[in-house]
Image (cartoon, rainbow, N blue to C red):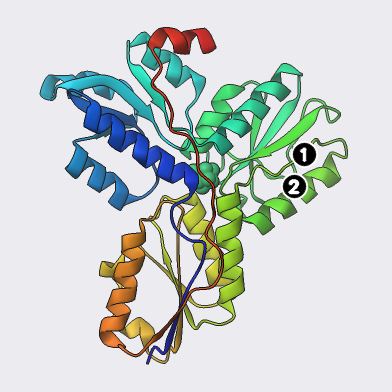
């Protein structure tokens, strides 16, 4: 019988996700013709489906798809880039296609792009720690300095993606000029340990003054760490493609029993046999109504359960991006 539910705080939407979703909704509302978004605006299936159904948004993985879309839909002539960031080559191509660009890249991802450009210009080799060469954020940052960048796996994930080097064996042309950057949404502990391995191998390794891991990633992982010892079962609401969500799930699984769900429709009664205390957290791209739906599902079965929610909400807001003309974009590149 479930007696108590601990809601992790903070959880759910971060400032980057709020900004990106608002940017899409706003542009879709004020556009004549359908809006096109490059890549899933945030890595959550529910968010993407709602934007498709309620705002008529089209998501593409390649700008070449736009030609086909034009044959069946009246398009707005605008494109939104997702919160994960985009390589400059994609921005250039979109400009050449004459598209008005709304760049919803999270400013904390942009910061890593800026570092990549800066160190590449200084002739450094960039060791970019990420969880997959296919992750949109990794592709975007890599695109800033492809000649200078080597992708490196988190030390616990070596071999999962063969395109990522092992931090224990990666070689660089000049060990005196090497810097480490990271994807923003990795495991805090594993990233620290991976950087320590690299530092031992390359004593001159430059590490950015502030970690590239973002505040939302850290805070959500801290909240799981605080709660895990109190709970028999942790429910982690996250899409499978959410990097920060999957890291939350791995952390919760290492500390207690955990299951990942997309939403309340995935819940199964037999998971709760012998479970008294349940923890709930959600990825930075998971809508809060899915969390509340999960609580409602539990309350419907155990109406007397106690709800606990300690911690602080974050007070961070990011400014919405302004549309840029192709000429403005080409001048920036
Ligand atoms: S998870 Fe972090 S880096 Fe990603 S959008 Fe949110 S605040 Fe930005």
What is the tally of numbered marks visible in this picture? Answer: 2
Mark 1: which secondary structure? loop
Vertical placement of residue 326 versus 223, above or below: above
Q: What residue is pinned by disc 2?
A: 195
Label 2 – label 1 distance at C-alpha: 8 Å
Q: Nearer the viewer, residue 90 or 114?
A: 114
| Camera-side mark, 2 or 1 | 1
Q: Is residue 130 visible?
A: yes
Q: What residue is pinned by disc 1?
A: 207
Vertical placement of residue 286 versus 65, above or below: below
Quadrant showing the N terminus: bottom left
Bin the neighbour count of mark 1 within 10 Å (Cα to Cα): few under 14, some 14-19, many 20 and up: some
Percent across and percent down for residue 173 are 78, 25
Identify which residue is drawn at 44% across, 85% down. 4
Q: Nearer the viewer, residue 11 or 194?
A: 11
Percent across and percent down for residue 169 are 75, 43
Identify which residue is drawn at 74% across, 37% down. 208
Vertical placement of residue 37 versus 6, above or below: above
Pointer 2 and pointer 1: residues touching (CB < 8 Å)?
yes
Mark 2: which secondary structure? helix
Q: Is residue 111 left or right of residue 262?
A: right
């Amino acid at each position: 019988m479930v007696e108590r539910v601990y809601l992790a705080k903070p959880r759910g939407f971060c400032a980057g996700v709020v900004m990106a979703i608002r940017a899409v909704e706003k542009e879709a509302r004020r556009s004549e013709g359908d809006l096109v978004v490059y890549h899933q605006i945030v890595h959550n299936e529910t968010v993407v489906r709602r934007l498709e159904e309620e705002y008529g948004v089209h998501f593409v993985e390649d700008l070449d798809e736009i030609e086909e879309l034009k044959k069946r839909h009246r398009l707005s002539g605008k494109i939104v880039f997702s919160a994960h960031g985009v390589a400059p080559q994609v921005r250039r191509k979109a400009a050449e296609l004459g598209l008005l660009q709304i760049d919803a890249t999270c400013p904390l991802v942009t910061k890593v792009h800026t570092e990549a450009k800066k160190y590449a210009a200084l002739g450094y080799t960039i060791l970019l720690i990420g969880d997959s060469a296919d992750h949109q954020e990794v592709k975007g940052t890599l695109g800033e300095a492809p000649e200078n960048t080597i992708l490196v796996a988190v030390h616990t994930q070596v071999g999962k993606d063969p395109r990522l080097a092992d931090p224990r064996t990666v070689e660089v042309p000049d060990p005196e000029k090497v810097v480490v950057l990271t994807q923003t949404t990795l495991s805090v502990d594993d990233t620290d340990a991976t950087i320590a391995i690299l530092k031992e191998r390359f004593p001159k390794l430059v590490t950015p003054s502030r970690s590239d891991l973002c505040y939302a990633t850290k805070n959500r992982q801290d909240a799981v760490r605080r709660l895990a010892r109190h709970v028999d079962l942790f429910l982690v609401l996250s899409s499978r493609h959410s990097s920060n969500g999957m890291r939350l799930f791995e952390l919760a699984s290492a500390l207690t029993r955990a299951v990942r769900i997309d939403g309340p429709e995935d819940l199964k009664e037999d998971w709760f046999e012998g479970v008294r205390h349940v923890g709930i957290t959600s990825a930075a791209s998971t809508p809060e109504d899915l969390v509340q739906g999960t609580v409602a599902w539990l309350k419907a079965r155990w109406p007397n359960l106690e709800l606990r929610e300690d911690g602080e909400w974050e007070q961070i807001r990011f400014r919405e991006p302004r549309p840029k003309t192709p000429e403005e974009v080409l001048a920036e590149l």
